Amino acid sequence: MSDDYIIETTALSKQFKGFTAVNSVNLKVKRGTVHALIGPNGAGKTTCFNLLTKFLEPTSGSIVFNGRDITRMAPADVARLGMVRSFQISAVFPLMTVLDNVRVALQRPVGQSFHFWRDETMLDQFSDKAMALLADVGLTDYAFENAGDLSYGRKRALEIATTLALDPTMLLLDEPTSGMGREDIGVVATLIHRVAASRTVLMVEHNLGFVSDLADTITVLARGEVLAEGTYDQVSKNSEVMAAYIGTPE
């Protein structure tokens, strides 16, 4: 595996009781870039994402991350190596402040755990770092609001801040704009630009237009296989990609 690539799959496949969801996918993500894995509904994007982050075991094939074979590793072990993911559904503590959500997350890299019945002053040591992370995702003005009161887009920003608290070298975003209105989509696009400045980002998306200004490389899946790969200009003009998204005229 070249040092240019942070993650590489070889012939990655996943079958469910005879149904092939991902079929012999070869994927290379270049270090320090934004890479989008896109495709229409049912293309195998989320299955592929779950294979990469080890929430599913592959039927066959291999996954190498930062020079290590992680094909049979557990998700927690992969996270400790620096590959951290978000999920389609935003996951925050709604009755805690935005700041406290991040302060709790910051304990994990130093091997601590927070007991909710204990004095929260134990979190004070993480306040400066937490505020810096909130600044990174544009949430400084919301630090002392309850997380449950945020808009959906800002909840996603908070989730990314808690993910960044684990200091990942590679951040994986699962459908970051799912269920969002136009204003929230703009917030998340700006956020991804910010966090990608110092790390590799791989995102799963169905919206080709959303990734047009964000992704350095786009891999298009259809029926579990790689249909096309390249820049936005290259894949958006590919006739097979257009057929997969809008259908072939009869």
Image (cartoon, rainbow, N blue to C red):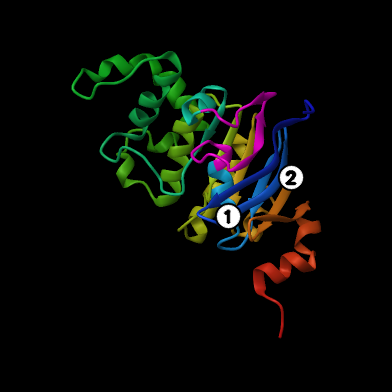
* Magenta span: 51-73
In the image, taking residue 144 as reference, residue 225 lies left or right, namely: right
Neighbour class for label 1 at 10 Å: few (<14), some, many (≥20)?
many
Residue 120 placement (x, y as % from top left)? 25, 20
- Front in this rendered view, residue 241 or 124: 241
In the image, taking residue 171 as reference, residue 124 lies left or right, namely: left
In the image, taking residue 178 as reference, residue 203 lies left or right, namely: right
Q: Residue at x 20, y 18 (%)?
A: 118
What's under tag 2, amino acid-wise?
Answer: Asp
- Front in this rendered view, residue 83 or 74: 74
Q: Residue at x 36, y 35 (%)?
A: 98
Quadrant assignment, res 224: bottom right
Neighbour class for label 2 at 10 Å: few (<14), some, many (≥20)?
some
Q: Residue furthest left?
A: 117
Task: Say if the magenta span includes residue 55.
Answer: yes
In this figure, which residue is indicated by the disc labeled 2? 216
In this figure, which residue is indicated by the disc labeled 1? 21
Residue 76 placement (x, y as % from top left)? 47, 27
What's under tag 1, amino acid-wise?
Answer: Ala
The answer, for residue 34, to whether it is visible in the render is: yes
Q: Quadrant of the N terminus?
A: top right
Q: Secondary structure at mark 1?
A: strand
* Callout 2 touching callout 1 (CB < 8 Å): no
Residue 2 placement (x, y as % from top left)? 79, 28
Q: Quadrant of the C terminus?
A: bottom right
Compared with residue 80, is residue 21 higher up or lower down, i.e. above or below?
A: below
